[in-house]
Amino acid sequence: SQTIHQWPATLVQPVGSPLSLECTVEGTSNPNLYWYRQAAGRGLQLLFYSVGIGQISSEVPQNLSASRPQDRQFILSSKKLLLSDSGFYLCAWSVQRLNYGYTFGSGTRLTVV
Amino acid sequence: GQQLNQSPQSMFIQEGEDVSMNCTSSSIFNTWLWYKQDPGEGPVLLIALYKAGELTSNGRLTAQFGITRKDSFLNISASIPSDVGIYFCAGPYNTDKLIFGTGTRLQVFP
């Protein structure tokens, strides 16, 4: 069966520090991969998605970047965190056919202080 | 651009009550998906709908694919405390990504 792993679960980082969040999927090949951010009590904002290794689509220009170094690995990064980067970050995967929806990871709560 | 509007934005109900929420789109969808997000967790798929007029149940949850293909409805019968969370509708925006609704926050009081 397919599983998605996202870590860490919580993170407190100072302003100006770098960020690296990792997401991996097991049990499937060539998944679509997604990074979302959710502000407290708010909706889901798509940040990046990838339909293949090295292919990254950016939805919102901001202080973050994403990379897909391997088929089932998706990394969200920042060189210098801002206070506004705080939020709940969710990774998700899907098969190529979106009719089955996404499967989300358990999320990373990032607090920038 | 395309967007999904959910209503109500939030609901505060008593345990045992039934719940109804809906999702409307400015354009036609071929698939409607309903997710639930527990506090502090990622959203989980509840129900998927693939045909206009389709009515699908999952336990106490029932969802309907609107006839116009521009809306969908989710009902929860006899609510319990663990129904608390945010409910999102979603549909394929294009071949690569979904579009999510604005969410309905449900609070259940004993």
Image: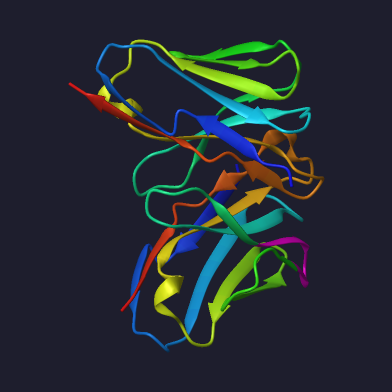
Please give left or right for residue A21 compared with residue A108 in the image.
right
Tag count:
0
- Residue B56 can be seen in this image: yes
Q: Position of residue A31 (x, y in %)?
A: 72, 53
Q: Nearer the viewer, residue A50 or B105?
A: B105
Q: Position of residue B58 (x, y in %)?
A: 51, 16
* Residue under the image location 54 percent in, 32 percent down: B6
The span shown in magenta is A48-56
Please give left or right for residue A94 compared with residue B83 in the image.
right
Residue B92, image quadrant: top right
Q: Nearer the viewer, residue B30 or A31?
A: B30
Farthest left residue in view: B110
- Residue A27 can be seen in this image: no
* Residue under the image location 47 percent in, 86 percent down: A18
Q: Is residue A28 above or below residue B35?
A: below
* Residue under the image location 67 percent in, 28 percent down: B32
Q: Position of residue B38 (x, y in %)?
A: 38, 39
* Residue under the image location 48 percent in, 15 percent down: B75
Q: Position of residue B60 (x, y in %)?
A: 43, 13
Q: Is residue A65 above or below residue A87?
A: below
Please give left or right for residue B6 compared with residue A111 in the image.
right
Image quadrant holding the C terminus of chain B, namely: top left
Please give left or right for residue A48 compared with residue A85 in the image.
right
Q: How is the image coloured?
A: rainbow
Residue B94, image quadrant: top right
Q: Is residue B87 above or below residue A6?
A: above
Farthest right residue in view: B95
Answer whether residue B63 is magenta in the image: no
